[in-house]
Image (spheres, rainbow, N blue to C red):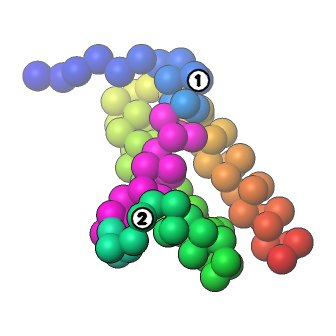
Amino acid sequence: MRFSLPDTFKAGFVPGLLLPLFGFYLYYLGFFQYMGFDAFVDHVIRANLAVSVLSLGVILNLGLFFLYFSNQRDQAARGVIGATLIYGFVVLYFKVLA
């Protein structure tokens, strides 16, 4: 049984923005659950790991892209690419300024 996926730019863009943040939270749960989430965020910022951890979260967008692409939802796949590009520019911005 196939489920219906919407084929709009927004249907890929919004999850493409949220999924890396979910990945960031999963990283916290997997490796730093012993500390509070606020302390984890503070640690990541002070240790200059924010860009690296966020970049790992963007990998989740790859699965979302292929989900949309394999179900022939090209506009939604473009939305995921658009969100990923925004994260790419954010990472590039912090890498150049840091």
Q: Residue at x 32, y 73 (%)?
A: 34
Q: Residue at x 50, y 23 (%)?
A: 11
> Which residue is denoted by mark 2 in the rendering?
36
Amino acid on which disc 1 is placed: Phe
Q: Residue at x 50, y 69 (%)?
A: 40
Please state if 26 lies on the left or on the right of 90 as rendered: left
For the C terminus, the quadrant is bottom right
Which disc is residue 29 wearing? none
Please state if 18 lies on the left or on the right of 5 as rendered: right
Which is nearer the eye, 76 or 27? 27
Helix, strand or loop status at disc 2? loop
Q: Residue at x 75, y 56 (%)?
A: 90
Q: Earlier in the sequence, mark 1 or mark 2?
A: 1
Helix, strand or loop status at disc 1? helix
**Where is 82 relative to 76, above or below?**
below
Amino acid on which disc 2 is placed: Gly
> Which residue is denoted by mark 1 in the rendering?
9
Task: Kindly report the secondary structure that dominates the magenta region of the rendered protein.
Answer: helix
Which is nearer the eye, 10 or 97? 97
Q: Is residue 24 magenta?
A: yes
Where in the figure is residue 71, as x and y percent of width and height? 34, 30
Q: From this viewpoint, is residue 61 visible?
A: no
**Where is 70 relative to 34, above or below?**
above
Which is nearer the eye, 74 or 8? 8
Read off the magenta span.
Answer: 15-30
For the N terminus, the quadrant is top left
Where in the figure is residue 39, as x and y percent of width and height? 51, 68
Please state if 38 lies on the left or on the right of 25 as rendered: right
Query: Looking at the rendering, which quadrant does residue 30 occupy?
Result: bottom left
Q: From this viewpoint, is residue 78 visible?
A: yes
**Where is 54 relative to 87, above or below?**
below
